[in-house]
């Protein structure tokens, strides 16, 4: 080991750091800075091929930081930090881990990539349609480059936001990414950092925004060395996945700075358009501003003047997260709506067990979610045995993200089956119409749009001892579902650590060419959502709904000035049961605008979507609704005064 004299404490004045910590390539060398209050000395351990490893002692700086400028190093340099205990560890702010979390860090120059997205303005402020994907299974190759070549298909489909599951590096050969340990290092499993940048650059060229799922509530159990640098990173509390983070305790300033810098980093160095914050109910902070508010502010500042979108998962469903800070909220843009998923899941599958037991999947539930956002707004959940949710009055409808599938919910069946394999195809088409036309922000999960045959299972590659704990943890979690409570079911659950479990989840993108009916269904609904005034960011006052039968309901969009005219009104009729024949329909929402009548605009029973053909639907005197269907009606002006004996109008026939 070659000991080198102490490095310069600061770079020359013309060299400015991008981040408060980490290794940054600058003219003439590399500047290193790390927070390590648990050590009295820190040295950079540099491994240069063909030379003896060199130690460059860093100088102590304020508040437990160490820093120094090392000349004649540059991008590609591999290094670790050597602490008082004599061991060398990866950089807590490493921008790349070429050999994984247990290997050395690599100096990355983010300015070396040539961007072509200077004219990109960021995601639209409304009308978003989200597509969640996992890079490792989205294609057969499981790389950024392979995923980049599939982006034109998503642009053609009509989605406009790609939500990428977590990529912060983690140990092993595969995983979901929620046990990441290197916050700033995109995992080596999918390619190098510039491959990620090329993915984002290509997405922007196609009009697609890209947001990244980040985990700020815990760090993974393997390969996390932060406590060797500073035990103060962690709070004296536990989440269900590991130790909680110290956002409001003693010496939390540097912890908050690290996570704020991480949010800024993804926006600045990867041109991302926002973040999806995982399980924010496990982020504890009594500070002002709350760390979630601070993160949202960092994202907006880093992107300015581009627009951004920050969405969170918050299982208790507290609406305050998306209220403005002026109204006492945390100021994020959107929140996942589990109520929609759970009610729709029950409506589709009849599966009322575990957390689904709080739902009936009834028309009234679905109408209430359309008109109120969350279904639970403070009522006691029988399953959780405590109040769930908070009031949503005044929150804009598109602040709620609705979905029929996501990574968790598809995997929360023992075989990872998708809804098209567990529900009635015609019911699924009907509720897909509700999902993609509803007032919320809709989200699709990878492959949903073409009814992918690949399942999506829980997979994670760990060393043997941890792998056994993960297997048992998965069995314990799945035990809450009564239908899986057979004596041998635990042994039949796919092993998360088996490479075959991971391989089974890879999408076959060629199914887009053969599963044309499902693709046409989703594309046509997305086109309607984007083209028609009714579906463009309606306010709570513009939309209403009502139950019209045991399994039937209507949703009405009002489009009078200033949004449009009465002719822009739309009525979605959803019948999840048997054919419904109503001689009269005394429901005000079903009445067409004055001087107009309803005509069929779209039907889920169209054969091009896999339907069996559309039987007559009566619109004028009584209503006859096809079984398990959704029909969209448009308002058109009357050409003559309607007569009482005028024939009833069947769907699909001109009058």
Image (cartoon, helix red, strand yellow):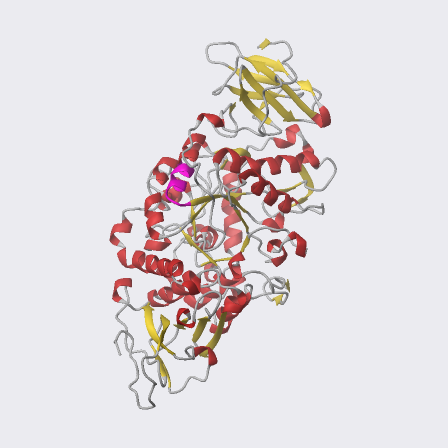
Q: Is residue 569 above or below residue 2?
A: below
Q: Is residue 206 magenta?
A: yes
In percent of the image, x 54 and y 66: which residue is there? 540
Q: Main secondary structure of the magenta part?
A: helix
Q: Is residue 59 left or right of residue 299?
A: right
Q: Is residue 166 left or right of residue 251?
A: left
In percent of the image, x 61 and y 38: which residue is there? 260
In percent of the image, x 40 and y 60: which residue is there? 529
Q: Quadrant of the N terminus?
A: top right
The furthest residue to the bottom:
645
Part of the protein shown in magenta: 199-208
On the image, the x and y values in percent for residue 640 come to 32, 83
For residue 623, what is the image quadrant?
Answer: bottom left
Q: Is residue 176 magenta?
A: no
For residue 216, what is the image quadrant?
Answer: top right
On the image, the x and y values in percent for residue 501 come to 39, 44
Front one among 527 and 68: 527
Q: Is residue 550 above or below residue 193?
A: below
In percent of the image, x 66 and y 22: which residue is there? 66
- Res. 29 in view: yes
Front one among 345 and 151: 151
On the image, the x and y values in percent for residue 228 come to 64, 28
């Amino acid at each position: 080991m070659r000991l080198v004299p102490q490095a310069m404490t600061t770079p020359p004045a013309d060299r400015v750091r991008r981040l408060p910590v980490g290794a940054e390539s600058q003219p003439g060398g590399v500047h290193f800075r790390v927070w390590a209050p648990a050590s009295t000395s820190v040295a950079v351990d540099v491994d240069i091929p063909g030379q003896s490893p060199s130690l460059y002692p860093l100088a102590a700086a304020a508040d437990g930081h160490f820093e120094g400028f090392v000349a004649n190093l540059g991008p590609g340099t591999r290094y670790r930090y050597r602490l008082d205990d004599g061991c060398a560890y990866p950089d807590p702010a490493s921008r790349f881990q070429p050999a994984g979390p247990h290997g050395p860090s690599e100096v990355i120059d983010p300015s070396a990539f040539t961007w072509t997205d200077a004219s990109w303005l960021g995601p639209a402020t409304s009308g978003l349609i989200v597509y969640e994907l996992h890079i490792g299974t989205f294609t057969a190759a499981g790389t950024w480059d392979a995923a980049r070549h599939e982006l034109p298909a998503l642009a053609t489909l009509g989605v406009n936001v790609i939500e990428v599951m977590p990529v912060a590096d983690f140990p092993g050969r595969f995983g979901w990414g929620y046990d990441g340990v290197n916050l700033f290092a995109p995992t080596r499993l999918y390619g190098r950092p510039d491959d990620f940048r090329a993915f984002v650059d290509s997405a922007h060229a196609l009009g697609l925004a890209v947001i990244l799922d980040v985990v700020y509530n815990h760090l993974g159990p393997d390969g996390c060395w932060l406590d060797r640098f500073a035990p103060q990173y962690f709070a004296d509390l536990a989440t269900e996945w590991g130790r909680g983070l110290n956002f409001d305790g003693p010496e939390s300033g540097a912890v908050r700075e690290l996570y704020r810098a991480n949010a800024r980093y993804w926006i600045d160095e990867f041109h991302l358009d926002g973040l999806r914050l995982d399980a924010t109910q496990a982020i504890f902070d009594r500070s002002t501003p709350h760390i979630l508010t601070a993160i949202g502010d960092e994202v907006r500042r880093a992107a300015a003047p581009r627009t951004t979108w920050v969405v969170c998962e918050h299982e208790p469903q507290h609406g305050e997260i998306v209220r403005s800070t002026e109204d006492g909220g945390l100021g994020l843009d959107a929140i996942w709506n589990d109520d929609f998923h759970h009610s729709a899941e029950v409506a589709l599958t009849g599966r009322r067990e575990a957390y689904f037991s709080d739902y009936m999947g009834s028309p009234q539930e679905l109408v209430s979610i359309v008109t109120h956002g969350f279904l639970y707004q403070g009522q006691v959940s029988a399953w959780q045995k405590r109040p769930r949710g908070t009031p949503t009055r005044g929150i804009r409808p598109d602040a709620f993200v609705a979905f029929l599938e996501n990574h968790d919910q598809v995997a929360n069946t023992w075989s990872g089956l998708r809804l098209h394999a567990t529900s009635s195809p015609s019911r699924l088409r009907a509720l897909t119409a509700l999902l993609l036309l509803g007032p919320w922000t809709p989200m699709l999960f990878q492959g949903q749009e073409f009814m992918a045959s690949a399942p999506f299972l829980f997979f994670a590659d760990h060393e043997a001892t941890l792998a056994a704990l993960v297997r048992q943890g998965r069995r314990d979690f799945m035990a809450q579902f009564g239908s899986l409570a057979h004596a041998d079911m635990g042994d039949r659950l796919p092993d998360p650590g088996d490479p075959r479990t991971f391989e089974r989840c890879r999408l076959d993108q060629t199914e887009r060419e053969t599963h044309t009916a499902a693709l046409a269904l989703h594309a046509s609904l997305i086109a309607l959502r984007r083209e028609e005034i009714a579906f463009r960011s309606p306010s709570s006052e513009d939309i209403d709904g009502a139950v019209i039968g045991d399994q039937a309901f209507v949703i009405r969009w009002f489009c009078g000035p200033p949004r449009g005219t009465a002719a822009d009104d739309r009525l979605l009729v959803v019948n999840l049961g048997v054919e419904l024949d109503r001689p009269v329909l005394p429901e005000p929402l079903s009445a067409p605008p004055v001087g107009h009548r309803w005509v069929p605009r779209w039907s889920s029973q169209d054969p091009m979507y896999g339907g069996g053909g559309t039987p007559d639907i009566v619109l004028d005197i009584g209503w006859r609704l096809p079984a398990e269907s959704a029909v969209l009606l448009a308002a058109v002006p009357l050409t003559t005064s309607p007569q009482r004996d005028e024939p009833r109008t069947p769907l699909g026939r001109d009058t």
